[in-house]
Every structure is written in C-alpha cells, then in structure tokens.
Amino acid sequence: MAMEPQLTPLIESLPSTVPFVGPETLERKRNRPFRARLGANENGFGPAPSVISAMRDAAPDVWKYCDPENFDLKAALAAHLAAAPGAIAPGNVVVGEGVDTLLGLTVRQYVREGTPVVTSLGAYPTFNFHVAGFGGRLVTVPYRNDHEDLDALLDAVRREKAPLVYFSNPDNPMGTWHEAPEIEAFIAALPETTMLILDEAYGETAPASALPAIDISRPNVLRMRTFSKAYGLAGMRCGYAIGAASQITAFDKIRNHFGMNRMVQIAALAALEDQNYLREVVARIIAGRDRIAAIAAQNGLAAIPSATNFVTIDCGRDGAYAANILNGLIERDIFVRKPMAPMLDRCIRVSVGLDEELDLFEEKLAETLAALK
Ligand SMILES: Cc1ncc(COP(=O)(O)O)c(C=O)c1O
C-alpha cells in the first residue's frame, strides 16, 4: 500500500468546510449573478472616496513589504479609541486580517484539545470553526427572546470552568444588542480566569449606549472591531482587538507578521481619519434598516429591531417556511441569508444595501410570498 504523509488525528477528524457559502459560490452554481447582494452584511455604500484615493496613491509602492508592526495604524487606533489622551497605548491594540483571523489567534491562545469554550447556539459560526480547528469543545446556550442570554452564558462558563467565552454585541445573526451596563455586569461577574471575546464588529452602527467604556486594565476582556462593516472595507481584511497589554503581546507570538498588507494598512488609516464619511454612512445604514423594516411590515412580517447593518425578519412560521422564502429570493436573484439554529431559524437576514437593491428586495419579497401562498 502506498504511504502518505499522516495528518494529525485532529486535522484528520475535521470536515473540510468553510463557515459560510459565499455569494460567489452560489453564483457559480446558479450560473447567474445576483442582482442584489444583501446576504453577507457587507457595506454596499463602500469606503470613503478619501480611502479609495489613498489606496490608489499607494498602489505603486506595493513592491515594498508592509510594516510588520503595523505601527502607524496601531498608534492611530489607540488615539482614536482613547477616552482621554494616552489612555490607550499602541501596545493595547493588535491588528489582524479581519476579526475572523483574530478570533482564530485568540482560540489558539486558550484552547487545546477538549477545552470547553462557551458561546450562544447559532452565534457567529467562524468562531466555532476556529474552536473546532484547535480541538476545543463547544458549549452552547440558546438565545432568549432573540438576544444572546448573558445569564446563561455566565452559568455555562462557571459550570464548565471555561477559559474562553464568546459574545457579540450587537449580535449576528439577530441584530439585537445589550446595553453597556448589562455587559459591564457580565464582565464583573466573569471568573478572572475566563477570557471574554467581546465581538463588536457592528459597534459603529450601534447606539453609543451599547458600548461599554474601554477598560484596558481588565486582563480578561478582548474587544474586537473591524473595518469590514461601517467602514466598507470587508474585502481588504482589517480587524483589531483591544485589551490589556499583557494579553495583546500574546498575539505577537503567533500572528502572521506580514499578514496585513501595505495597502490595507493605508486604507484603514485613511478610513479612520475620515470620520465625517463614517457618520454619513452610518446615517444611511440606519435609514436602510428602517426601509427593510418597512418592507417587512408591508408584507405582514416583523422586523426585529437591529443595531447592525442588517435586519433580521421574523417570517412568523417555522424554519422550513423561512427557508422557502430564502430560496424564493435567491431564485429571484436576491442574495440573503438566514439563521439556522432552532428558534432563530424562523427568520431571514437582510443586509442594508443600495436603494436600487432594496427596491428589488421589496419587489421580489412580495412575489416570493405570493408564490408561497
Ligand atoms: C459578529 C461578527 N464578527 C466578525 C465578523 C467578521 O469580521 P471581519 O470581516 O473583520 O473578519 C462578522 C462578519 O460578518 C460578524 O458578523
């Protein structure tokens, strides 16, 4: 029998899968492009013109490696995030290829085979993907009233003595959020030996009251944010984590030092500098949310209040019915997604998009529902 290189038993045991089926995959399968791209919580308004022009100016220099320390971007982020000058140092910030990458690096720091890791059932699947990749044991707690259940997460952490818990605020896939005092109480109650990943990928589109003040004196909290959503740079891949310097240093031991390419460093810096554009886009996102909610209502469906750049719509029946609506929309060239976990699966999830995309969604949702009658 021919010999072949032996994978580790862990890698051998993993399914070869990606957490999300991309719209490009679906388009290849369908042999037809989508007419509205409303499924991946991207930001169709795009990055600021100032960002595009900074990238254009930077293009001839891509023969140079990037700064492996991400020095300028980390300094700018520290200054931007600090409530008072100097309150957050560059050493409290790590930059990575999207929150997704930082999630993987964090899991690697705390998880070995069999380690219990707590999250909500149906929460962000990329986190679960990384836990599986390092052999961790996922412990999930159901949502309560379409919100992540902080009390149940805490109970599970204590029961399992879990070194890592994941919580996203605002939440994906439901779009719901908790107010800062609830999160602060959760953090205060958390065992000191448990690291909390507080994923704030949608922080910029949330009410300020949902974001606790950043406290870098707590060694067991990592706040994660991204340029993928409100800043409109999903394809560039740039996220960051903020935390105690001792914890942030751990990332430098394992991160891919040239992972942040030169162009993305420049794009993120320029995006951060253009806060006026960010404010405009957030206003457009909020208007888009209202529009999606109105479209839902007009069709007899209920939008769940959202603090993100998407709206989750309760289709009012079971998961099979919501799946039929999703499929009907996809057949009609509208890319949307849906939550899959029990209780949440009665919904579809629609990202804010350009007016013309929402026009199409409006038309095709009504058609789909009529066809299902
Ligand atoms: C909760 C949550 N975290 C992280 C991400 C991914 O962020 P990034 O593009 O920075 O990897 C997403 C994107 O959908 C998300 O919904």
Image (cartoon, rainbow, N blue to C red):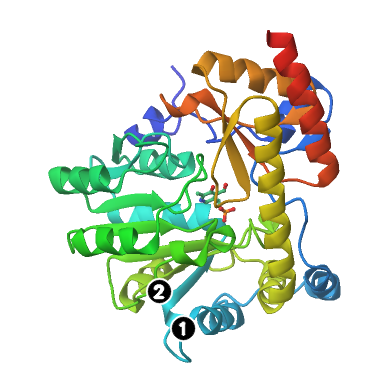
Graded by Cα atoms within 10 Å as few (under 14), some (14 to 19) or many (20 or more), the crowding at tag 1 reads: few
Q: Earlier in the sequence, mark 1 or mark 2?
A: 1
Q: Which quadrant of the rendered structure holds the N terminus?
A: top left
- Kind of residue at disc 2: Ile
Which residue is disc 1 drawn over?
A: 83
**Mark 1 touches mark 2? (CB < 8 Å):** yes
Q: Position of residue 249 (x, y in %)?
A: 37, 74
The residue type indicated by label 1 comes to Ala
| Marker disc for residue 218 | none
Residue at the outermost top position:
373
Relative height, residue 43 to residue 366 (above, below): below
Measured in 3D between alpha carbons, the distance from the residue under mark 1 to the one under mark 2, in whole angstroms, is 8 Å
Is the CB atom of the residue marked by disc 1 within 8 angstroms of ligand 1's nearest atom? no
Q: Which residue is mark 2?
A: 214
Q: Secondary structure at mark 1?
A: loop
Is 335 placed left or right of 52 in the picture?
A: left
Residue 64 lies left or right of residue 7; in this view the side is right
Residue 237: x and y, percent?
A: 63, 58
Residue 277 in the image: x percent, y percent? 74, 70
Residue positioned most to the bottom:
85
Percent position of residue 125, x then y: 47, 39
Residue drawn at point x = 38 percent, y = 51 percent: 167
Task: Classify 78 as above or below 265.
Answer: below
Residue 361 location, quadrant: top right
Residue 256 visible in the snapshot? no
Residue at image location 45% in from the left, 51% down from the top: 177
- Occupied quadrant, residue 39: top right
Res. 299 visible in picture: yes
Tell me the crowding category of disc 2: few under 14, some 14 to 19, or many 20 or more residues within 10 angstroms, Cα based: some
Total numbered labels: 2
Q: In the image shown, does 234 or 215 lie closer to the viewer?
A: 215
Which quadrant of the rendered structure holds the C terminus?
Answer: top right
